[in-house]
Each structure stands twice: as C-alpha cells, then as structure tokens.
Amino acid sequence: MLAGRLLSLAFLLAPARSQAPIDLPEVRQDAGSMDCAPAAAASSILWLRTHGFPGLWADEAPGALVEELARRMRTRERRGTFAKRFLTGVESFVRSRGLRARRLEYRGRAPHPARFGPDGVAPDAGWLRAALASKAVVWLGIGRYRRQDRGGVLRRESGHWVSLAGVDVDERGAAGAASLVIRNPAHGAPQSLETLGTEPLADGILAGKEGEPEVPAAGFSRIVSGFKTRRGQIAVVDSAVVLELRP
C-alpha cells in the first residue's frame, strides 16, 4: 500500500508532459497588410473544421474566411486588430455558425470586456499547455516594446498575432524548455511551424498607448529567439486568446 501511495505521489509531482505541436494549416496575410489577426484566427478555425466542427467553414480557400473575420474584428488598415476586437470578432463568428463556445478567454495586458477574463493576468505556459491539451485553439499577441527612460517601463510600439501550435516543444515535437511553437501568418515567414525561445520577465511595467492601464511585467514571457524585432525592441507575449467549442 505504501508503495502504491509513493507511486501516486510521484505521478502527481512529475512535470507536465508536453504534447506534439498541432498541424495548423498555413494561412497568410497579404503583403503590407495589417490583417495578421484574422489570418491567424483563420488558421486555427480551419484546423477546428477538420477536428470535429465541419460547420465552421465550408470553403476550402482561406481568403474569404480571412475577409469575414477581418470584418467581424473590425481590423483597421493602419492599426491592425485590438485584443478586444479580436475577442468580440471570434465570438460573433462562432455564433454566426450556429455554435457556442465552452470558453472564450483572454489573458494579457490589453483592455478587454470583463466577460473574457480578469485584467492584467499573464498567459503562463501552464495555462497555454492545458488549453491545447483540452483541444482548444490558442492565439498569441506578441508586442514589440522599447524600454523607456523612467525605470522599468516597457512601451508597446507595435504587435503581431500568431496561432499557437505547441508549448515546451519544438516544431518537430522534441521536448524543449521555455519554447512556443507557432504558425506565423506574416507574409514572407517560413511555410513550416516556427519555434520561439522564451524567458520570463522578472520585473518592470508593460505599457500600451497613452491612457491605457499599465500592468506589472513579472510573469509575462519575453521572446529571446525566433522572432524579428527592430534594433532596441523587446518582444513580449502580452496577449493570449483561448477558444474551446461545445460539441
């Protein structure tokens, strides 16, 4: 009996196993456009269509789906898609297909409607991993920040949306600590899945545009490899959206 209890305890204390990255279909944003959000969303929606939800989208070509999502997200030509519009756009699209979300949740820095989750909560690796394990789809917002003169403040200059395919693995499925596997919709990005190396931020403040609330940076992940930034910029995973549909 003691041996059985010890075995059970060892199982509970064992680190969470990483799963192989999901094979998200390739969907590209147009060159020079700001439609990374609807393109990333389309990739995951097309994956869901072939994994239990065929009614999500009937057309094989992704272009019309990107346009539909851009309209519902109110994607702007020069400013892209805000997190709150991403959330309400996905919500609107799912309802238009006669489906219901078991969960549509947000974690991150950006202002958003309260029904999608609390403010200022970092999207940690455990939460992301659990979402993928539950057959939900996940989107990440990656902010490009620059350190300000006043102590510890990182000011967001731009951002980019991607689809999440795996956590703590690489694009081939090999285990790797502190890594994210993504499908990048950027024009000119590799056609295959990409691996981003990350490390946690220990302190500081994440700030958006003037007037938006500032949030503590501790617990958010900085990207240290695999993502392009301009000189002096710091890339941070500052948003995550999880969608799990009801069967």
Image (tube, grey):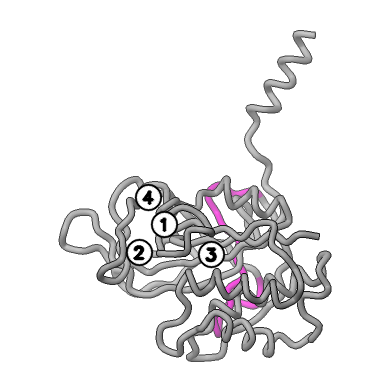
The residue wearing badge 3 is: 140
In the displayed structure image, the side of residue 171 where residue 97 appears, left or right: right
Local SS, label 3: strand
Mark nearer the N terminus (2 vs 4): 4
Q: Is residue 61 magenta?
A: no
Amino acid under disc 4: Leu
Q: Where does the image place residue 41, in percent across and percent down from the top left?
A: 62, 74
Mark 2 and mark 4: Cα distance apart in space: 11 Å
User: Would you call the spot at circle 2 few (<14 residues within 10 Å), some (14-19), or many (20 or more)?
Assistant: many
Residue interval drawn in magenta:
175-192
Marks 2,1: beta carbons within 8 A = yes
Mark nearer the N terminus (2 vs 1): 1
Marks 4,1: beta carbons within 8 A = yes
The residue wearing badge 4 is: 201
Amino acid under disc 3: Leu
| Label disc, if present, on residue 234 of the rendered structure | 2
The residue wearing badge 1 is: 222
Mark 3 and mark 2: Cα distance apart in space: 16 Å
User: Would you call the spot at circle 4 few (<14 residues within 10 Å), some (14-19), or many (20 or more)?
Assistant: some
Mark 3 or 2: the one toward you? 3
Amino acid under disc 1: Arg
Local SS, label 4: loop
Residue at x 59% of width, y 52% of height: 128
In the depicted structure, whether residue 178 falls above or below residue 8: below
Q: Is residue 179 magenta?
A: yes
User: Which quadrant of the view contains residue 221?
Assistant: bottom left
Mark nearer the N terminus (1 vs 3): 3
